[in-house]
DNA sequence: TTATTACTGTACGATAGCGTTTAGTAAATG
DNA sequence: CATTTACTAAACGCTATCGTACAGTAATAA
C-alpha cells in the first residue's frame, strides 16, 4: 500500500548498470531492506549490523554493500522506507464530511492508531538514536510527518471556521493543540517503554474527549455542542 | 539544587568499605557521572564508552569499574542521576494561587521550559535508545516524570473544580489534555532533531493559548473567562 | 560466444571496545 | 608500625563488527 517512493527504494543506492551485464535483482534489494527493518524492530539499532542483515535476508554480505554502500547508507534507507510508508498511511487518513465532530473523531482514531503502532514507535526511536549525526533524517520525517499532518488538520479546521462551525482564529495552533490533546503523555510513554500500548477503548476515549474539548473551546457561539459528560 | 537522591548517587555502586582502609573519593564518583553525562549529551550513546569516560573524568578506567561495576551500571547511574534532577525540577514547579489561569500559566511556562531543555531531551533520547533492553529505566522515569506531573496537575484541577472555578469531571484526563496541548508536536520534533528549540515568546504563546483552551473547554458556566482573541 | 555485471562464500585485516590483571602508589585505621 | 582499601598506569585477551579481497558462479546484452 505504500506508494513506492523513489527515495526509499534508493535510486542512487541501486547499482544501476543501465544495460550491459546481469541486471540487479530488485527482490534482493527489498529483502535486505525488510530484513534490516525487522532486525531493528526486534531490538535496538545495535541489532542492525551488516552481517545479521545479510543472514536474515538470505543474501551475501557483499551484496548488501553493493546495494547500500555502507552501514550508514543502509540505516538511511531503512528510515526513508519507514518514512514513505508513514506518509502513505497519513495520506490514507479518513476525510469523511459527515459533521465536523464525527470527521475529527474518525481522523483522530486513525491517527492515534498509527501513532501508537509498533512501526511508528520504532521509527521515532530510531530517529531519537540517530539525532546528533544524520540530523537531516529527523528533519525530513518531522517535516512531512508531524508538520504535514498538523497543516492538513489545520486546513480542515480553517474550512470549518469558514463555514461557521468553529471559531479558531489560528487554525494551525488549534490543529497542533488537538494533536497534543490526543497524544497527551501517551506517545512519550510508549517511546521510552514506560507504558503499554493503549487498547481500543482507551484510544477511543482519548480521541472523543479530545475532540469535545477542542470543539467546546473553539465553539462559535455560546456552546451549542453537547455537554462534556 | 537537586535534593541529592540516594538512587542516583548509587548507594550500591559505591565500594562502601565502612571503616578500614582508604575511603573512596566521592569527588571521583561525581566526576565520572558528570563526564559520562557530558559525553552522552554531546553525541549519542555511542560516545558513552568506559575509556572516554575515564579520560574525561581524569580517572583511571579501573576506578570506573570499581564504582559502577559495568557499562550497563554506568548508563543506569547516568539515567537515574538525570531522573533525580528531573524530579527535583518538577518538584520546584511554581504553585502560586493568584487565580487559576495565572497559576496554570506559570506552571506551564516552567514545565515547558524544562521539557524543551537539552537535559530533558537528552534523557528522552537515552531512554528511547535503551527501550528494549533496560525497560525498567523507562518505566521508572515515566512513572515519576510524566505520570507524576500529570497527577499533580490533576490534583490542582480537581481542587479548582471543587472550588467551582472549573467543571472537569475527569481531572486526570483534563490534566493530560493540558499537558498535551502545551507540548503539541514540539517535543516530538525536538526529540528527533526535526525542529529547533522554541524561543521564549513562542513558549509563552503556546502555554497561554493552551491554558485558555482548557479553561474555555471546562468552563463552569457560560464561559465567564475572557475571549480567545 | 564473449564481455560484462550481479551475486555467493569465505577469508582477511583493521579497529574498537569491554572487562581483567598486575604492579605499584596513596590514604586511611588500629 | 602493619593492614587494608582506593586509586593509577599500562598491558592483555577477547569478541564484535566493519569493510575489502579473492575466486568462482549466474544471468544478461552485444
Image (cartoon, coloured by chain):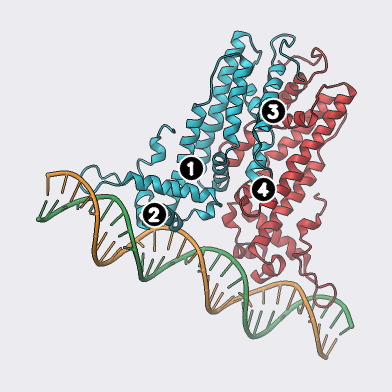
Chain colours: A red, B cyan, C orange, D green
Badges 4 and 1, same chain: no
Badges 4 and 3, same chain: no
* C-alpha distance separating marks 1 and 3: 31 Å
Please rate how many residues cluster around mark 1, counting C-alpha atoms within 10 Å: few if below 14, some from 14 to 19, many from 20.
Answer: many
Question: Where is residue D27 shown, x and y percent of the image?
Answer: 80, 75
* C-alpha distance separating marks 1 and 2: 21 Å
Tell me if A195 is positioned left or right of A101 in this view. Answer: left
Using the image, name the chain to which the residue with label 3 belongs. B
Q: Residue at x 61, y 41 (%)?
A: A191
For marks 1 and 2, the one nearer the N-term is 2
* C-alpha distance separating marks 2 and 4: 37 Å
Any part of residue A104 in sight: yes
* C-alpha distance separating marks 2 and 3: 44 Å
In this rendering, which labeled residue sits more in front, label 4 or label 1? 1
In this rendering, which labeled residue sits more in front, label 1 or label 2? 2
Please rate how many residues cluster around mark 4, counting C-alpha atoms within 10 Å: few if below 14, some from 14 to 19, many from 20.
Answer: many
Q: Is residue A154 above or below residue B78?
A: above
Please rate how many residues cluster around mark 3, counting C-alpha atoms within 10 Å: few if below 14, some from 14 to 19, many from 20.
Answer: some
Which residue is label 4 attached to?
A123
Q: Residue at x 46, y 35 (%)?
A: B84
Question: Where is residue D29 shown, x and y percent of the image?
Answer: 87, 78
SS at mark 2?
loop
Using the image, name the chain to which the residue with label 4 belongs. A
Badges 2 and 4, same chain: no
Which residue is label 2 attached to?
B58
Label number found at residue B79 = 1
Amino acid at each position: 500500500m505504500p506508494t513506492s517512493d523513489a527515495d526509499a527504494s534508493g535510486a542512487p543506492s541501486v547499482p544501476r548498470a543501465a544495460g550491459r551485464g546481469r541486471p540487479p535483482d530488485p527482490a534482493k534489494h527489498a529483502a535486505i531492506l525488510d530484513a534490516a527493518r525487522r532486525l531493528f524492530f526486534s531490538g535496538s539499532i545495535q541489532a542492525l549490523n551488516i552481517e545479521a542483515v545479510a543472514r536474515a535476508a538470505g543474501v551475501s554480505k557483499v551484496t548488501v554493500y553493493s546495494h547500500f554502500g555502507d552501514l550508514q547508507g543502509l540505516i538511511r534507507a531503512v528510515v526513508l522506507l519507514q518514512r514513505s510508508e508513514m506518509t502513505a498511511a497519513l495520506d490514507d487518513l479518513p476525510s469523511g464530511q459527515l459533521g465536523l465532530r464525527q470527521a475529527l473523531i474518525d481522523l483522530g482514531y486513525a491517527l492515534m492508531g498509527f501513532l501508537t503502532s509498533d512501526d511508528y514507535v520504532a521509527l521515532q526511536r530510531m530517529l531519537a538514536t540517530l539525532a546528533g549525526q544524520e540530523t537531516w533524517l529527523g528533519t525530513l520525517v518531522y517535516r512531512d510527518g508531524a508538520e504535514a499532518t498538523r497543516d492538513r488538520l489545520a486546513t480542515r479546521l480553517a474550512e470549518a471556521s469558514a463555514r461557521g462551525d468553529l471559531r479558531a482564529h489560528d487554525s494551525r495552533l488549534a490543529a497542533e493543540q488537538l494533536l497534543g490533546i490526543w497524544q497527551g503523555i501517551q506517545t512519550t510513554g510508549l517511546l521510552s517503554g514506560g507504558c503499554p500500548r493503549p487498547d481500543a477503548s482507551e484510544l477511543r476515549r482519548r480521541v472523543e474527549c479530545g475532540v469535545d474539548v477542542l470543539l467546546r473551546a473553539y465553539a462559535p457561539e455560546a456552546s451549542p455542542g453537547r455537554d462534556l459528560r
